[in-house]
């Protein structure tokens, strides 16, 4: 989890020019999740949204097979990913809490479908300065297929 300086997410050029890791941590995690599911459909992964409790920020989308998770950090134990997110949230915002919400793959690249989930609003790949999906696919290639 990263916290961006004010104004970066609202400036398409500054947002696009973030490092890969920060870009896929701060507002494009769902695009990376979609690229993963697209590349490795046979591995049994699904998308999960970390939905902050009412009044808090700190949304995140990752993929998991129930044991191994993948996000901008790469592969790690799902339990460790979730624990890290909760710890950071509570460090920055006392009382932070959230829930894990499974998401269908098609929601990850559709603003309209994402809005059908209370509190969720995801940008489609083409709603960034440039299409974010090719960038996500290239970033994903750095990690290779899921282990085991």
Image (tube, rainbow, N blue to C red):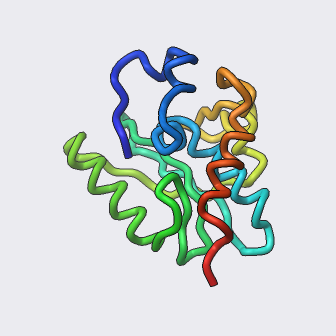
State which quadrant residue 6 falls in: top left
Residue placed most toward the observer, 38 or 115: 38
State which quadrant residue 38 falls in: bottom right
Which residue sits at x=73%, y=74%?
43
Which residue sits at x=56%, y=17%?
13
Q: Residue furthest bottom?
A: 148
Q: Position of residue 132 (x, y in %)?
A: 69, 35
Count of marks, rendered view: 0
From this view, report whether residue 145 is shown above or below residue 94.
Answer: below
State which quadrant residue 126 falls in: top right
Q: Position of residue 79 (x, y in %)?
A: 42, 71
Q: Residue furthest front?
A: 142
Please indicate whether residue 18 sits to the left or right of residue 46 in the image: left
Q: Position of residue 122 (x, y in %)?
A: 63, 34
From this view, report whether residue 12 is shown above or below residue 24.
Answer: above
Please indicate whether residue 4 sits to the left or right of residue 73 in the image: left
Please indicate whether residue 91 sits to the left or right of residue 81 in the image: left
Residue placed most toward the observer, 117 or 148: 148
Which residue sits at x=53%, y=77%?
67
Residue placed most toward the observer, 8 or 81: 8
From this view, report whether residue 10 is shown above or below residue 118.
Answer: above
Q: Position of residue 141 (x, y in %)?
A: 67, 57
Which image quarter is the C terminus in?
Answer: bottom right
Which residue sits at x=65%, y=66%?
144
């Amino acid at each position: 989890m990263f916290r961006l300086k004010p104004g970066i997410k609202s400036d398409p050029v500054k947002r696009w020019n973030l490092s890969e890791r920060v870009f896929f941590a701060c507002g494009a995690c769902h695009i990376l999740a979609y690229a993963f599911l697209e590349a490795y459909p046979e591995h049994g992964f699904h998308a999960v949204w970390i939905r902050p409790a009412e009044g808090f920020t700190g949304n995140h989308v990752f993929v998991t097979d129930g044991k191994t998770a993948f996000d901008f950090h790469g592969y790690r134990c799902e339990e460790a990913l979730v624990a890290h997110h909760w710890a950071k949230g509570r460090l920055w915002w006392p009382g932070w809490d959230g829930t894990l919400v499974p998401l269908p793959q098609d929601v990850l690249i559709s603003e309209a479908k994402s809005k059908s989930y209370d509190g969720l609003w995801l940008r489609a790949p083409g709603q960034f300065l440039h299409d974010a999906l090719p960038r996500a696919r290239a970033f994903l290639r750095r990690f290779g297929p899921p282990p085991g």
